[in-house]
Image: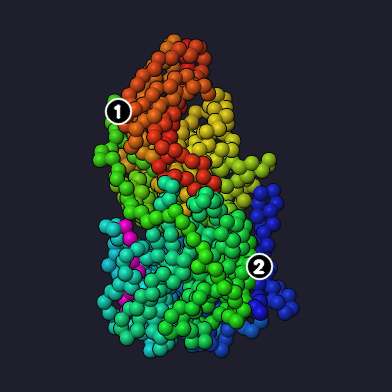
Amino acid sequence: MRIHLAILMLWPVFCAGQVTVSSPLYLAHDHARFAQDRPAAVYQPSFAAVPGRGLVFAWTAYDRGSERILSAELTGARMSPVRQLSAGAGTYYQPVIAAGREEAWAVWSRLAGGVWTVAGRHQSRGQWQPVVGLSPAGVNATRPAAVAAGGRLFAAWEQQLERGSRIAMSDGAIVSNGPYDYRPALVADERGTVWVFWDSYSPGDRRYRVLARRVHPDRGPIEAVSDGSVSALKPVALSAGPAGLAVAWISRRDVEALGILDQWYTIQAARLVNGKWERFGDVADLRHGLLPRVEPRVGALTGYQGERLRPMLSLVNGSVWLLWERKLMHSGGTETFGQLCGRRFDGAKWQEPVSLHEGLLDYRVAADRFTAVAKGMLQDYRVFEIDASQTKSLAVASETWPGWRAVDLPKALPESRRSAVIDGAEFQLYWADLHVHSGLTPDAEGEPDELIHFARDAARIDAVVIQENDFYSRMLTEGEYRMGLHYSRLLSEPGKFLALAGFEWTHRQDDNRPNHRTAIFPSYDAPIVRHAENNANFGELCDVVEAAGGVMNTQHEVYRWSGRACDANIEVASGWRVFIRNPEKIHGDLSAGARAGFVATSDGHRRNPGTGGGLTGLYLRALTNTEVIEALREHRVFATNGSRIALDARANGTFMGQALRAKGRVELALKVWAPKQIVRAVLIRDGAEIHIAKGGANQLSLTHSDAPGRGSHWYYWRVEIEGESPDYPGNIKVAEGNLAWSSPHRVTVE
């Protein structure tokens, strides 16, 4: 039997597009409520046990663009009144509770004045002391970890340097060597020895490694915990008494099937015994719900509102448990509930995997007991005990994924960058994936830094835009949005690689048809408009984007073209499907006068930006944020469904995407450079195919003269190369499709 102790509920109410919430706590015994005066959603809960007192909780409470850090305590079956830990409203992220023998600390990140800092509060004998700053002033410090040992707080965080990041400690020490160090985890053993673990990314071999260092009472050398054979990231650590230190992490392997690129994730583990690391290899297989099956046919996968790439460790009755979450049904929809899974280590080997709990999401389990926090489909977090005697077996041995094979990335790319002379100036061709989701979107997975490193070093594209949903099953908090922008700014290097700022407007209209937009900005101080908070006012969205110097692209095959200055381009293909294969909507908007370029994106939910079935080619004078925005605004772009098919299309010498006037005839010229043999190039005018040119080589140069008659006309080219672009279900597409489309010319014939 599983005993529910308490339920922290969030009840959303949708009124004319606005959201109001209240956060009562239900106790299983007397249904008492509290915090009805706290109209804020619950995010990122953390908790720990203080001996003799009970559980101390902290969470981020979001309300209309700002957050607070709140806290409460659960003693027996009674929850205390809610206390506010932060000094007022602001932008906060990831509170952490560290508990000692009779005291607790709460630590979190806060954005103020454009800088992320780490702050905290100490609770002694039930009383919270004032907020204190832990990280240096003026230096970005994010994603803290904390542990209590010997009546003292040890905290660690990611600290941004001039380029990249390191792991810093609350005593002022930098304990890692970089170049890109993330996600610290702290643990203290029964003797008070404190260790810090983190993952470190190396651009040389494009892998993450889990590293460790003893930091108290003396500082030891940096030690390799993972073996370096595959990427290893997101470590968690546990002191298991005589069994030593236990560590677990996510491992990632790039895999390919039928031209589709994806990742196979597992959980690996190790323990430190007598000064030596004993590695266990793959302890849990995470393909269930994350990696699609491709044989005997490709099956669709939808998202999941929990977090499947977060290992947990818990010490229960002297045994170490490895815990992880997965979707209950592999092929279930986004609204599918989750399953808490586990394997017990008996001191010699890992026992068979079991299901410990089902029917909730975002499971979080205490390190020293089987007390858990999880939520329903809303932000209704519940506190409950797990009964380890009531488990059921996981049939993981029978789960197979034939057809997938390991692949080494990056693949070979063209040796030289294409260029074009436009209006007397030279422009270089760059490649971008303009729409990617990280785990900050509820139904996606992957860390922002992980996606950006993949785009830069594995996909070898030049620019990426991580765009989270403004509202999808829950609100994108200010802290989450700004944290994503932080990593985009941190990992951008003009002239070499860009990660631009943006978000996705995810509104469905009165007829329940989508009108999504991806907004992209030149500055990292980028605004956000959430449709659930502005009564779905699309005009206000356009006003804000235009005022900030941004642009927008449509999404999906259904949208409403606005004609506003910021509405710049139409997405003709993505990782979901090739929308322009059914061209009536796009052609109708062009015939109605829409001045738009063509773009393609992965709209990636599968952690593979740049290889997810959509790329945009941009002609830029230099690789900078402002140049990218200008190219999008001026339609100096073209679209492919994944392959680097370079296009240069002109009408009477005018570059593609532009408007021109002509007298009588229009001379259409096209140049193509393709990675495979070109099959054909098709010229479309006003929705009709008016000319087809056969290929036969990897390059093509042609002209066609047309006399369309007086009036307004539009033209674009569709280029086809060898290969196929199967319409696999869901967000699953071949990495390198066989199609490309030039941005339309608008021609007025006098």
The quarter of the displayed image where residue 88 is located: bottom right
SS class of the residue under badge 2?
loop
Residue 558: % across, % down: 59, 38
- Seen at 46% across and 83% down, the residue is 346
- Kind of residue indicated by mark 1: Val
SS class of the residue under badge 1?
strand
Q: Reading the chain from its start, which is encountered first: label 2 or label 1?
A: 2
Report if residue 537 is visible in the image: no
Q: Is residue 91 above or below residue 275?
A: above
Looking at this view, name the residue that lies furthest to the right: 30
Q: CA distance from mark 2 to mark 1?
A: 60 Å
Which residue is tagged 1?
421
Q: Is residue 317 above or below residue 305?
A: below
Q: Nearer the viewer, residue 484 or 127?
A: 484
The residues colored magenta run: 206-215
Q: What colouring does the structure picture have? A: rainbow
- Kind of residue indicated by mark 2: Met
Q: Nearer the viewer, residue 263 or 188?
A: 263
**In the image: residue 566, left or right of residue 179:** right
Q: Which mark is residue 9?
A: 2
> In which quadrant is the N terminus drawn?
bottom right
Q: How many marks?
A: 2
Residue 623: % across, % down: 32, 42
Q: Nearer the viewer, residue 624 or 597?
A: 597
- Seen at 39% across and 29% down, the residue is 679
Q: Is residue 209 magenta?
A: yes
Give neighbour class at mark 1: few <14, some 14-19, many 20+ (Cα, 10 Å).
Answer: few
- Seen at 30% across and 72% down, the residue is 224
Report if residue 494 is visible in the image: yes
- Prevailing SS of the magenta stretch: strand
Residue 407: % across, % down: 36, 54
Q: Is residue 363 magenta?
A: no
